[in-house]
Image (cartoon, rainbow, N blue to C red):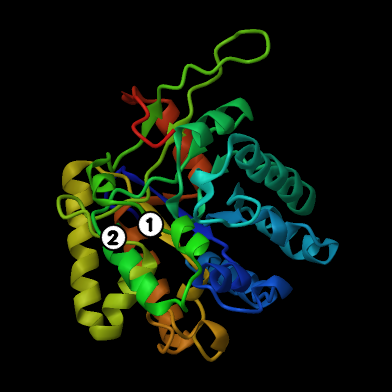
Amino acid sequence: MASSGLLASLSLDLDNQWSYMRTHGDAGWETRPSYLPLLLPLALDLVESVGLKMTVFLVGEDARPASSHALLRQIPTRGHEVGNHSLNHLQWLHKLPQDELAHEIVEADRLITAASGQKPRGFRGPGFACSTTLLRILARNGYDYDCSTFPTFVGPLARAYYFMSARKLSEQESDERQDLFGGVRDGLRPLSGYRWALSERDEQGQPLPELLEIPVTTLPVLRTPIHMSYLLFLAQRSPWLMRRYLDTAIALCKLRGVEPSFLLHPLDFISGEECPALRFFPAMNMPARQKQALLREVLLKLSEHFVVVPMNQHAQALRQRGLPLRQPDLAA
């Protein structure tokens, strides 16, 4: 049982093998290799084994094949929420022209709704891509919340690691990825939920409900990541270090009244044995069983201190409070 009345939301960005390969610049991604038939039931089983539900952010192209529909319908059928993670998982999504950006969101919404049987009400940009234009498109299309902001100072370090590990990129590819994972300025953004001041109106000129922002939580004060992939990065060096870091994160969140939004990725569940093409990712040499045991341990620890819910329930609770209103300070 949670030792505080604070909420924590749990989500999984269901990035597929092909999307990681494309971002990394690897050949063969065009054939859309997928681990979803293995990964999704595994992830749902593990989360449910500790009595939790989560939000699963789907990529639209993974929902397009009719053969994927039965698999994706498991998400709402088993009591989890479906979210929108864009059509093509372009981590430079925020750089697209407005019409292309709108298509990425609206077409993904259509495909995900048709495949899963549930209409998404929340959005997360791939690679935490976000812009004012993107937020306005979400508001106009009836979205309740966005969760694309990642208030950390380590974006440039993650980008440097990416460029060191990627193959030689073309000039266009390098330009697309030049602000991948954000900049130092992102570390100054709020850790707790707020409302975007967008002043959007419907076709009749009536004000639309304000779009909520639920940041992916980072360590209060230091603003270093606390998502599961980072915890596994630490555990690869020392499980003791991972546990002490998590304890510190939980204590600081409770002290400052921050309700964590805890993020999972597919590679938190599997290893290079299951997916050799992605061995270049951190912690992919850790056995899958060890990863899963650590993930279960982390989720149980979070449940001891917070009421862990899917993101739509977190958003609903936030709407009942007097959240601060924030002017967009993102790229147009």
Front-most of residues 208 and 252: 208
Residue 51 seen: no
Element carrying mark 1: loop
Classify residue 273 as left or right of residue 233. Answer: right
Is residue 227 in view from this perspective? yes
Return the residue nearer the eye: 321 or 332: 332
Nearer the observer, 329 or 231: 329
Q: Earlier in the sequence, mark 2 or mark 1?
A: 2
Front residue of 240/21: it is 21
Residue 38 x/y as whole percent: 65, 78
For the N terminus, the quadrant is: bottom left
Q: Position of residue 199 (x, y in %)?
A: 48, 16
Instruction: Using the rendered view, name the quadrant where residue 212 is placed.
Output: top left
Categorize mark 1 by other alpha carbons within 10 Å: few (<14), some (14-19), many (20+): many
Q: In the displayed image of the protein, which residue is found farthest to the right?
A: 66
Q: Residue at x 47, y 79 (%)?
A: 167
Left or right: residue 89 compared with residue 171:
right
Q: Does 24 sit above or below residue 318?
A: below
Q: CA distance from mark 2 to mark 1?
A: 7 Å
Label placed on residue 222: none
The reply to whether callout 2 and callout 1 are in contact (CB within 8 Å) is yes
Q: Amino acid at mark 1?
A: Phe
- Quarter-wise, where is residue 189 in the image? top left
Q: Quadrant of the C terminus?
A: top left
Q: Name the residue that disc number 1 marks.
A: 181
Residue at the location (25% across, 45% down)?
Answer: 185
- In the rendered view, tell whether residue 204 sits above or below residue 183: above
Residue 57: x percent and y percent?
57, 54
